[in-house]
Each structure stands twice: as C-alpha cells, then as structure tokens.
Image (spheres, grey):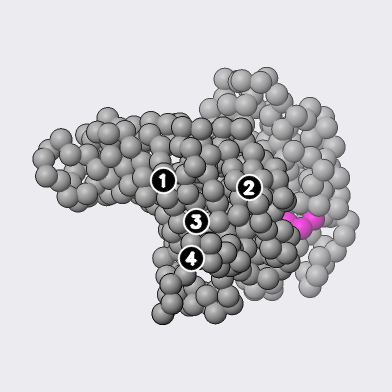
Amino acid sequence: MRDYSNSEINQALYNNIDALLIVSSKQDSYKTIKISDSISKLIEKEGSYKALIETLMFHMNDGNTRITDDYQIFLPKMGEFPEKYSRKLHLTIDGIKHVVQMLVYSLNKEEGEYIILLFDLDKSEYERDSKMENKVKTIQETYLFSMYVDLNKDYVGSINVSEISNDDMHYEVKYSEWRMMIVNMIWPDDQGMFLKMTDPAYLKYHLKPSKTLSFDCQMKNLEGNYIWVKLIFGRTEIISEQDFRFVFMVQDIHEDSLKLFNELKKFENLASHDSLTGLFNRGRIETELSNAIDVLKKDNRNVSLMMFDIDYFKKINDTYGHAIGDEVLKEFVQRLCKGLEQYNIKTGRWGGEEFVCVCYDLEIQQLKDIAETIRNSISNNPFNVIGSMTCSVGLTCVTKEDSVKDAFVRLDAALYKAKANGRNTISIM
C-alpha cells in the first residue's frame, strides 16, 4: 500500500460526500458547500436550520409526511449536538426511499456552529434496514414512544419515537419541562389525570421497585389525530430507597379500544332496548322520564307523557298466534315512530302491547293533536293479516312536584279512562 497525501485523502472523502453543510443553530441558518442532485431535491442550498432538522430528522418513518405542529416544540433541542454525532436517516426523495448517513461535527459549540455531512447509501443498505425493521415491527406498532426518566436528576433521555426512527432521538430535556410540554398533546378531558399520574411526588409514593403504573387516555399522534393509548411507568430495580428511575412508554391501544367500545355499545343497546321493536325498554324509558323531570326543574321546559295501548291485543294473539302478534307489534311501532319523528319525543315499550312516550317542549293540546293523528292512522289503515285494529291513548303533563311514580300513576289512570270510555279514544289526566 502506497502512502497517500492528506490532500488525496481529503479529496477522496470530499468526492464521496453527497452533501456538506455549515450550520448555525443560534442564527437558525445553514448553507451548503456541496450538494448532490438527489439531496438537492430534498433540501435547498441554504435556508432555516430548524427547517433543515425537521426535514432530515423529524418526519414520519420512511416518508415525507409532516408531523403535526403541536410536536414542533421539540425541534430546537434536536438541533443541538455534542462534539460528534452520527445517525442513519430514512428519507423519501422523488418517491424513492433512501438511507442517508448523517455525521455532525462541532465547529464552535458555544455559537452552535456545526458541519453536517450526508452520505446517500446504496439500495442494498435500505433493503438490509427494511429486513431489520420487519423483525421489530410488532414492537414498533405497539409502543409508539419510550424514554428513560430519573426523577432525582429531573432528567429525560433515551427518547425513542418508533414512527420517526428505530434509533433514540438526539434529545435531552428536564422531566419537569417534558411533562408540561406533552400535556398539550393529551385530550383536554384527560389532561387532569395525566398531570396527576405523572407528578413526581405521585410516582415516588405509588410506584414500588420493579412495578408498573398505567392509565388509558387519548393522545395526539404525530399526524395530529387523537388515538387511544396506554401510558406506562415502570420503576427500575433500585440500589437505595431514594433511587427513582423509571422507564416510560406509550402503547398504541386504539384499535383494541375501539373494538371494546363497540362491544360495550352493543351490550348497552341490548340492556336498554326492547329486542322485538327496537324501542327503549321499560327501565330505559323510566330513566328518560327521570331525566326529563330534572330538565323540567332546571330549564322550566314542557314535559308530558303519552301512553298507547293496542285494543284487544290478546284476541289477536289467540286468533292468529304469537308470531303474527309480534308482526302486528312491529308494524304498530313503525306507524307510531313515523307519527312522532318530527318531534322531540322518546318512545319505549312499557310491556306487552303498551308503549310510553316522554315528550319535550309540547303543549298538551299539541300533544293531543299528535295522538289523534296517530290514532286515526291506526284505526283507518288495515294491518297485514289481521285487518283493522284500534288503540287507546292516555296523556298527562308532568309537573315539577312529580316523582317518576307520580307521573306514571296519573298516566296509567288516563289510559284506563280512555279504555273505560269505549277504547279507540284519547283521555287526559
């Protein structure tokens, strides 16, 4: 091997560099000394240093998707480097994915001036990196964020955001600062719980060595959308009781949470709705009336009740069978709901062939007219199989002095009176 001069070595290095930049973090500026055609498609020849760092280090993994503005508060410290720094970047240039090696050397640490070298690696390097990423894909998809916390030193380090990079971020911050920065990414209703659970005094008191503490909340992801996550604190093994070091992780539980909420919604519907007609069941309509009385007392709005009862329904079951009887009930409910759809009225099946409506913002005469229209629709339009059928209706106004029981007793009396008056009529109590 022959001896090479410094100029030859320097020239060889220079020839293989795809970009050489001089930057100033204090002046928020950079300029390029050399830049290849491919890298020039990604960054300008000169410009804002903050924008440069965002382009190179603060975008979604393997893409150019811009991270939401809320996370931009983390950028300034990411542009501060020690004497030397190296990182492999995954960048997309003209739709093609590249692996770019970044090297940073300090020129003047006090002034925040650096040399940045960029080497666009060959395609095989990207393929090797992709294979490695696939091996840890499950972990990355589950844990969006992790970091190390030392409460005694008020220190946060080893931050990893899997959507940005497999590597730890070049970022260090005080835990007290991080906590107040990240709270703005939490759903407003969950921020109080976040501040309570992440308070150093709370963690020190509640979290024993080698134990974990977690809670679920909604948090903005890097694209600015709120997703369900599990925030997890795990205390490390200790040397002394005064050793308060933790690992903090953010786990993506969004899809599982949505599935759970959907299942809960199904059970909620089953618990509050009548399976045959789809209306509220008796327990749910009682709750609706209780809520309506509270509304009446608070806002002085009109609240009234209406009860429908199908006349001689037992005879229909005895004559045609219960299967036909069920079809009659469903057809009756369709007509009832059509007659009520333009009003603020909640309807439920009270039991058998009785149906109760909790009505808002209607005078009693208006309600009587509505009931009369529905009664006529029932009596004047034959039903499938059974032909003609009628119903009786009871009405009552709810007062501030009423309990749920008082209102239903009066409503029941009104319906009884309508039946006593020959059925197919309306009575008000």
* Range drawn in magenta: 332-336
**Position in image of residue 238 (x %, y %):** 15, 46
Q: Secondary structure at mark 3?
A: strand
Instruction: Tell whether label 1 touches label 3 (CB within 8 Å).
Output: no
User: Residue 203, located in which quarter of the rendered image?
Assistant: top left
Pointer 3 residue: 103
Q: CA distance from mark 3 to mark 1?
A: 11 Å
Q: Is residue 334 magenta?
A: yes
Instruction: Tell whether label 4 touches label 2 (CB within 8 Å).
Output: no
Q: CA distance from mark 2 to mark 1?
A: 19 Å
Q: Is residue 66 visible?
A: no
What numbered label is drawn on residue 83? 1
Query: Of marks 3 and 1, which one's residue comes earlier in the chain?
Result: 1
Q: Tell me the residue at 55%/51% (across/down).
A: 116
Closer mark to the observer between disc 2 and disc 1? 1
Closer mark to the observer between disc 2 and disc 3? 3
**Position in image of residue 358 (x %, y %):** 67, 38
What numbered label is drawn on residue 5? 4
Pointer 2 residue: 52
Q: Tell me the residue at 52%/44% (across/down).
A: 114
Closer mark to the observer between disc 2 and disc 4? 4
